[in-house]
Amino acid sequence: MNAPLQPGALAAQVVVWQAEHGRNSLPWQNTQDPYRVWLSEIMLQQTQVATVRGYFARFMDALPTVQDLALASLDEVLGLWSGLGYYSRARNLHRCAQDVVRLHGGAFPRTAELLVTLPGIGRSTAAAISSLCFGERVAILDANVKRVVTRVLGFDGDLALAAQERALWNAATDLLPAAEVAAQSMARYTQGMMDLGATVCLPKKPLCLLCPLQSACRACAAGDPQRYPVRTRKLKRSSQSIWLLWAQTAGGAVWLQARPTPGVWAGLQCFPLFDSEAALMDAVPLQRRAAMQPQATFVHVLTHKDLHLHPWRLTLENEADLDALSGQWVAAAQWPAMGLPAPIRKLLASA
């Protein structure tokens, strides 16, 4: 039988465990700089730590302060983000930096209540910034922490329902360190909950024997931790076929156009996209069509959609007139630094 839950004691166990066994050497740790913490939190949304490391380092080298980010062009930001995916994060990142400078004098708000009013900062991200940087006593509930909390509490409410989501937030708040020790405990507690979810309380094969909360965990006691969290409504996968016009000169210049918002790859520089092969051909001047060559079709996987991509390559001797298409020629030395969708960058790199 597992021991009754003692929230203050449970939080204290997380704090001790994090100091001894948690992640303490990541490049965005050991700092109370909200810019670094915010940037890492946004990058880590639905992205693995191993992937984020390199992007974080390059981003910090290029734009080391929120003021630098606010002054940068969106193209520069998307270029630094290119390949990381979920590009709305980068657009919101840019807007958020501008608001921090414009509305808050370049200093991040110190409370989750104010942080959540900024573009791209949701409730959990706001709480992560305010607790890690300013010691605010607020709960986070990213995907990893939801898993820890629902398993420890045996919380079987359906998180597809807003009422159950609210109930879980209240439950997570009840588990926080006591108010009298929050100032010195919150940063390590918050990091500890994230670390447990990322390294111990895994989705499919939780390492319960290594967990400091094992004796209090109701899911472990019942022998079914993988049952949690409960969410009945799942998004259905869809697919879409897209034809790409890959126009490139012998000197390496590429025809690119900015993608509209909203839509796939919104805001990025991209090959012209078409819904059918016929539409692509109609957009190419008649005298150029003989030079068109189909490339291998491939699938690019997004979170809830599979893109079936059909590239057609048009190689030209020079920057010929393609004015029937919106866009412009971009020199070979320029496009590598631009914000390009990952499959477009991969095609160009393979040429």
Image (cartoon, helix red, strand yellow):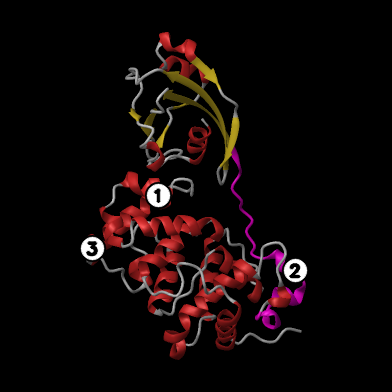
Which secondary structure lies at badge 2?
loop
Q: Amino acid at mark 3?
A: Leu
**Mark before the other along the chain sequence, 3 or 2:** 3
Q: Which label sits in the foreground, 3 or 2?
A: 3
Location of mark 3 (residue): 103
Residue at x 42% of width, y 49% of height = 81
Residue at x 65% of width, y 81% of height = 212
Disc 3 residue crowd, few under 14, some 14–19, many 20+, Cα 10 Å:
few
**Mark before the other along the chain sequence, 2 or 1:** 1
Which residue lies most toward the top here?
Answer: 287
Which secondary structure lies at badge 3?
helix
Mark pair 2, 1: CA separation: 42 Å
Task: Reply above or below: 272 against 4.
Answer: above
Q: Amino acid at mark 2?
A: Asp
Residue 340 appears anywhere in the view: yes
Task: Reply above or below: 142 against 275.
Answer: below
Q: Which label sits in the foreground, 1 or 3?
A: 1
Q: Position of residue 177 (x, y in %)?
A: 50, 84
Mark pair 3, 2: CA separation: 48 Å
Residue at x 35% of width, y 31% of height = 330
Q: Is residue 19 found inside the magenta-colored segment of the image? A: no
Mark pair 1, 3: CA separation: 25 Å
Marks 2 and 1 in Cβ contact (< 8 Å): no
Q: Position of residue 214 (x, y in %)?
A: 69, 79
Quarter that holds the N terminus: bottom right
Location of mark 2 (residue): 224
Location of mark 1 (residue): 80
Q: Which label sits in the foreground, 2 or 1?
A: 1
Query: What segment is highlighted magenta in the picture?
Result: 212-238
Residue at x 61% of width, y 51% of height = 234
